[in-house]
Image (tube, helix red, strand yellow):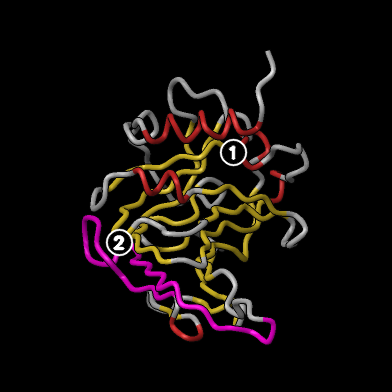
Amino acid sequence: MKYSLKFYRRRTLALLITGLFTAQVFGFGTDPVSSYLTQGKAVGNWSASIGNGLNYYIPLEDQQAATVRGNLTVRPDKQNAKGDALHLKWKGRKVKNEWGGNALYDSTFSLGRSNADISSVKELAALVLNIKVLRAPNALTKLTLQCQNSNKCKSEFPINTALGKLQKDQWLNVPIPLSCFDKSGQFDFSNLTGISIATQGKMEIVLANVGLAPLPEGMTGC
């Protein structure tokens, strides 16, 4: 029996929301192939930055940064110890351009400027966000993987519905199967170069770790 893309997306979100994903305990290490943010700090050659339509690349300094117009701010926070997590707040501000659109576009938190070959686990692993939701997103929020350092080589997965269903003010592990980013079969997992979270709306989260982990029990893909 064949199932539609919408079926698989609903199935993935249903498993996440009902806790099959969040019940797992994952470890996050210092291997830059499988770990990208550990205890609030970028791993290896990976670097953390934020940006929007007015300046796409603002690197974090001492775990702090703010976008132009202050729509997204980052500061150190705490999971178990001071500075082992990042506090990210999107304020939902908009700046009208000459056509009446939003000149800021998405405000984005990114891990990039490195590369990893994860092609051998693309059907077996999930990208895990170790996260605490303080304010659920009120607009489309995208988790994006980039390959080959190219905007033409990227894949997006919406996470606003999933984050909105999670219990607030509680640390949870939120895995998204890597296969969710490869619906067309064209994503180059041999050259992963960026991971980002972006929205034009309001959202407030604390993020401690981002990395790969085996698919949770009972999950075979997206």
> Which residue is depicted at the point 49% across and 31% down?
214
Mark number, residue 178:
1
- The stretch of residues the image draws in magenta is 72-99
Q: Is the stretch drawn in magenta largely helix, strand or loop? A: strand
Residue 87 part of the magenta segment: yes
Instruction: Indicate the quadrant where residue 178 lies.
Output: top right
Distance of label 1 from label 2 (alpha carbons): 26 Å
Residue 144 falls left or right of residue 199 = right
Which quadrant of the rendered structure holds the C terminus? Answer: top right
Residue 32's place in the image compared with 123, above or below, is below
The disc, 1 or 2, on the residue closer to the chain's N-terminal end is: 2
> Which residue is depicted at the point 35% across and 60% down?
205
Crowd band around label 1 with a 10 angstrom C-alpha radius: few (<14), some (14–19), many (20+): many
Crowd band around label 2 with a 10 angstrom C-alpha radius: few (<14), some (14–19), many (20+): some
Residue 130's place in the image compared with 64, above or below, is above
Secondary structure beneath label 2: strand
Secondary structure beneath label 1: helix
* Three-letter residue code for mark 2: Asp
Instruction: Indicate the quadrant where residue 113 lies.
Output: bottom right
Coordinates of residue 99 in the picture (x, y in percent): 69, 82
* Three-letter residue code for mark 1: Leu
Residue 97 part of the magenta segment: yes
Mark number, residue 4:
none
